Amino acid sequence: MGATIDQLRYVLSPKSVAIVGASSDFSKFTGRTLKYLIKHGYSGKIYPINPGRDEIAGLSCYHSVKELPEPVDTAFIQIAAKGIPDVLERCIEKGVKSAIIHSAGMGEAGEEGKKRQEQIKALAREADMRVVGPNCAGIANMVENIILSPVLCYELDTLTKGRIGLVSQSGGLTGSYVARAEARGIGFSYVISTGNEMDLEACEYIEYLLHDSHTDVIAVFLEGLRNISRFHKVADEALEVGKPIIVLKVGRTGVGSKAAASHTGALTGSDAIYDSVFRQKGVTRVETLEDLFEVPSLFCKTGPPEGNRVGVITTSGGGATLLAEAGAQAGLEFPIPSDAAVEEASEFLPSFAAKSNPMDVTMSGVGGGYKKGLEVFIEDDTFDIVVGVVGTSSQFAPEMGVKPIVEVHEGTEKPLAAFCNPNAEEALRLFEKNGIPSFRTPEACGRALGYLVNYGDFLERRKGARYVKGEIAPVKPNRDVVERVLGSPNRILNEYDSKKILAEYGISTIREYLAADLTEAKAIAENMSYPLVLKVLSPDISHKTEAGVMKLGIGSEESLEKGFNEIIAKARNFKRDVRIDGVLIQEMAEKAIEVIVGMSQDAQFGPTLMFGLGGVFVEVFKDVALRVVPISSLDAREMIDETKGSILLKGYRGMEKMDIDEIVSTLLRVSKLSDDLKEVIQELDINPLAVYPEGKGVRAVDALICKK
């Protein structure tokens, strides 16, 4: 049941509110939501509901929902969990349009709680009522002064309005966001706690904010996605409307693992897939709570710069170094200033001052050197971004570094940011007031600028590429062949059968034939050229190298006979009652760079594509890139570029450039195969895929398909 914009307005912009379980004691959490509505000037109608009161804070108090004089837009419910089904029924009968259930003790609280949550979910679904929570901290619409939350941060006398819409799957942390950001003068348009997401889930709020004229950037604290297809939709829409999504996704560690037959299955962890999906969709993933309001604040204040070159003016050499190191790790460059800039700086800086980048103005900053240094770097075309670093003076002598940054910012369109003493709250608020992105640590500043540059790079790549899924020549596999091969009773297809599926999707394979016995193997070899490769095919042996059932470099009939007998013996020793489908007689692949292309089914995201350097070392180095199917050619090229091994494919130190276009084509074909057969195939490996010099193509040397 997808939320419509109108339905969400009843929750996020209600004109009338009922507080079920309202207390007259504003020191209690059951009194605070009513208190904050009044305190912050909510202009709509408020109906407190408490069976033991006739009046609260000058407002008429109703003994039950049944007594409400009109069908209100939303009911904020904060009573014991066991009473909620009855209250929700009364709300439905009274025509209440939506509900925010603050109460816990539902789906997170054992079997009884789960049953209760399912009960209220069924009631809401039948009535087409939208529900926030349960077990949530409520919502705050800062734009219209609607605070439907008991979180103590709203004790603040004033709440700064901003253009960041915050959606959080952690209720308790919403107070931390608001309090920390408020101390900096950073404001939100909305703060939304999603709770258990029994009905409304994170992506539906994101979709609402994409259409909200008061929101420019969307910040999300994410524990996990419930609706993957909806996330894809809203992420694509965010790119179309130009609203960045910034995500703090928890759960990098503790990812469960299970035995997997393929390399891809072993290497595809759920957090790695989240990373890849965020990259695929242009979503910025940040690291810390502070990042979750500093980075959106940066994105609100400036668009992506023209490049990644940063110039730093500082009164603190150490702070500037930390910033530069963090920025370099994030992909930023810190080039030396132009000769003209150095010459101009020499006129006002002492001889001992560093006239490089960072440029340390030392105590000359007192005499106006800091402002002049900023102006020099702003005018220098060497830099795309300028950062002012201010040390202790930001707290005790803001005229030295803080005010010059504010003054220079007024006259420039080049992105200008600031890092200063974290205790300099007045300086940080001054920066915010004047639209200057500011940071409390040099590392956060470097990271944030890296995020901004990377987002800009993504937009440029997307603009310059044919961002169409599956742009390859039409693939028309023979369905009879595919169904016959996949109809095998074996869950793990042997290499020969796996390659039949690949061939139907236009993926180039190596020349090979299957021999049932030694006599047939010799006959096959007579029509092939030595050297050859021998491989035992068995549904019981996934990795032939580990089992020792493969022989390379077979150069004669004599060595063929010896090798054939050896690998058959090793196969029979590998496992009791091993099933042997035959021996594959394969031409010896020419020397090439080996890569791996694979697919594994993720429980949430479905078919997930993997690319990396291949061979036996893929699980050792784990140098792989992931994307969720289906992919575009842009995705395929980015997968290649993300691996450290890509340097070898592009012609390292005089080596020939490899056929990258054919790797892209293969990735697109595997994506198509994986999408078509996602109901049948669990894992797929092409390892290795031999890559030859540009124009000479690729060939699948070995392959494995595991069915569900």
Image (cartoon, helix red, strand yellow):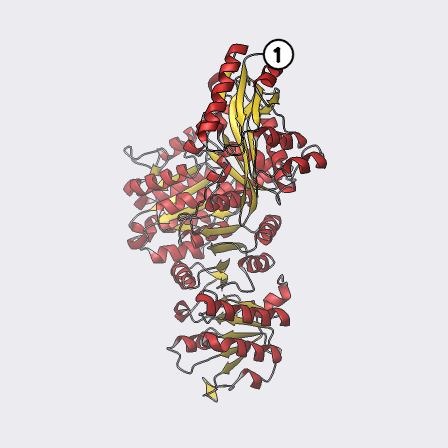
Q: Nearer the viewer, residue 203 or 584?
A: 584
Q: Which residue is tagged 1?
A: 526
Using residue 623 as the reference point, say whether residue 707 is left or right of it.
right
* Residue at (61, 19) in percent of width and height: 696
Q: Nearer the viewer, residue 642 or 187?
A: 642
Residue 160 position by quadrant: bottom left
Can residue 275 be seen in the rendering of this structure? yes
Which image quarter is the C terminus in? top right
Q: How many marks?
A: 1
| Residue extending farthest front | 577
Using residue 596 as the reference point, say whether residue 335 is left or right of it.
left
The vertical placement of 58 against 633, above or below, is: below
The vertical placement of 277 against 565, above or below, is: below
Q: Dot 1 surroundings within 10 Å: few (below 14), some, or many (20 or more)?
A: few
* Residue at (61, 25) in percent of width and height: 509
Residue 154 position by quadrant: bottom left
Element type at mark 1: helix
Where's residue 574, x and y in %?
45, 30
The vertical placement of 570 against 311, above or below, is: above
Where's residue 539, x and y in %?
54, 34
Can residue 556 be seen in the rendering of this structure? no
Where's residue 636, x and y in %?
58, 35
What amino acid does circle 1 point to? Glu
Q: Nearer the viewer, residue 328 or 361?
A: 328
Which image quarter is the N terminus in? bottom right
Where's residue 441, x and y in %?
35, 48
